[in-house]
Amino acid sequence: MKILTWQNLSPSEQKQSLRRPAQSQSEDLRKAVQDILTRVRAEGDQALLSYTESFDKIRLASMSVSAAERAEALAQLSPRTWDALRIARDNIERFHRQQTPKRIELPVLPGIRCFREPRALERVGFYIPGGSAPLPSTVLMLGIPSLIAGNPIRVLCTPPQKDGKVNPIVLAAAELCGIETIYKVGGAQAIAAMAYGTDTIPKVDKIFGPGNAWVTEAKMQVMADPEGAAIDMPAGPSEVLVIADESASAAFVAADLLSQAEHGPDSQVILISTSETKAREVLAALDRQIMSLPRREIAIAALNNSRCILADDLATALKISDAYAPEHLILQVQDPERWAREVQHAGSVFLGPWSPESAGDYASGTNHVLPTYGYARSYSGLTVESFMKFISFQHLSREGLEAIGPAIEELADLEGLEAHRRAVSLRLRPEEQL
């Protein structure tokens, strides 16, 4: 990781230092994903099986995961694995149950009663990345808030392993969330299948889950298509930004950076420090720690896309972080609670030396499905409300309509919408109507 001094960079160099690697491929990626979506819409299951054979190197007889396959997989797992999954599930459920929305009702004026009620989305689809690191934790992060929300139809898609089966821990996590409809299909083609439906995979109303740049692009395209599906958020390759002052543990910071770098070669990690000495200590710790990582080649590739930036002070460091809008932000600084109040744009924030990003990834209780690519400026992480919609209601008596009728008629006149005005005047003054 090259060390850059922020105040010595021009505005264009500063912008370039915060650029995400996948963005440079955007046009080629857009066209390739569009072709996949078009083919899946036209050919359905045949296209899915063909893409699975091409991309995953496995020929499937069926994309559905049977009850027998689930039972066989669950029997393989050790009590220790089940205990870990249950601890994570319980903490995630405990935190997310506090997010359950309530009915809102207000008597706006005498005779006017407005209220809003939540409704669970009818059909939701979950995408669980596979590749070199299957993510059963993501099943919990999606399945638990969905279970709390009460979605009637829940579909899960995940890439098959080389043996044509789904990772057993992914199936165990699905079992703990009550998810039974599972398909062995991954990538942009899985997003297409859930967005448009095939003979095997039903169309859903909204798609959830992270993925690589291909999955993220597919989600964005189906969201823009009226015949497609809504999505949770743009959630692509993982990223973390760590702000470290002179009090930070170099070993802890390096470990946090590597925990994201090992996700994939397109992941990005950024270190911002107010101390050049500390920054060099972190880089030295990175060199030491990376050599013993089983996924060190992936982490090394990710570090090639990463940056170390020196800032004059923590206020400047926070401004740089907000400009980047990271998926994960770690504050390894003195008095992190004070500096947390300055954060404007981040998916999830980890405060102090004993709050590794891994805690949020697995078992602290917060959700790890978070906006990337800088979308933390306008998107939140996943919540129970993400799996719901809200309907507003109003009930007016004659007294209520009389109270606001003149205002409605005036505003309708101003907008030139006579039928709107008459809908009020006909009720209040029927004798004036033709």
Image (cartoon, grey):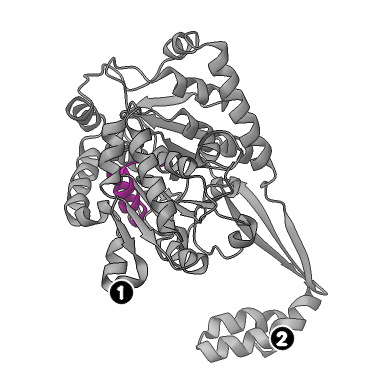
Residue drawn at 51 percent across, 27 percent down = 179
Q: What residue span does the magenta drawing correspond to?
A: 210-224
Which one is earlier in the sequence, the residue at label 2 or at label 1? 1
Q: 269 or 254: nearer the eye?
A: 254
Circle 1 SS class: helix
Magenta residue check for 221: yes
Residue drawn at 72 percent across, 54 percent down = 103
Circle 2 SS class: loop
Residue drawn at 49 percent across, 31 percent down = 137
> How much space separates mark 2 and mark 1, taking CA atoms?
64 Å
350 displayed left or right of 59: right
Give the residue at mark 1: 11
Q: Does the residue at mark 2 contact the one at mark 1 (Cβ under 8 Å)?
A: no
Give the residue at mark 2: 429
Q: 42 or 238: nearer the eye?
A: 238
Q: 305 or 119: nearer the eye?
A: 305
**On the image, which quarter does residue 160 sit in?**
top left
Q: Residue furthest front?
A: 277
What is the x, y in percent for residue 117? 67, 54
**Picture layout, residue 10 above or below residue 260:** below
Camera-nearest label, 2 or 1: 1
**Picture layout, residue 250 above or below residue 275:** above
Residue drawn at 64 percent across, 84 percent down = 408
What is the x, y in percent for residue 348? 53, 50
172 displayed left or right of 22: right
What is the x, y in percent for residue 14? 31, 68
Q: State the predominant SS element of the stretch in magenta.
A: helix
Q: Amino acid at mark 1?
A: Pro
Other-residue count near label 2 (Cα within 10 Å), few / some / many at <14 / 14–19 / ≥20: few
* Picture quarter with the C terminus: bottom right
What is the x, y in percent for residue 192? 30, 41
Other-residue count near label 1 (Cα within 10 Å), few / some / many at <14 / 14–19 / ≥20: few
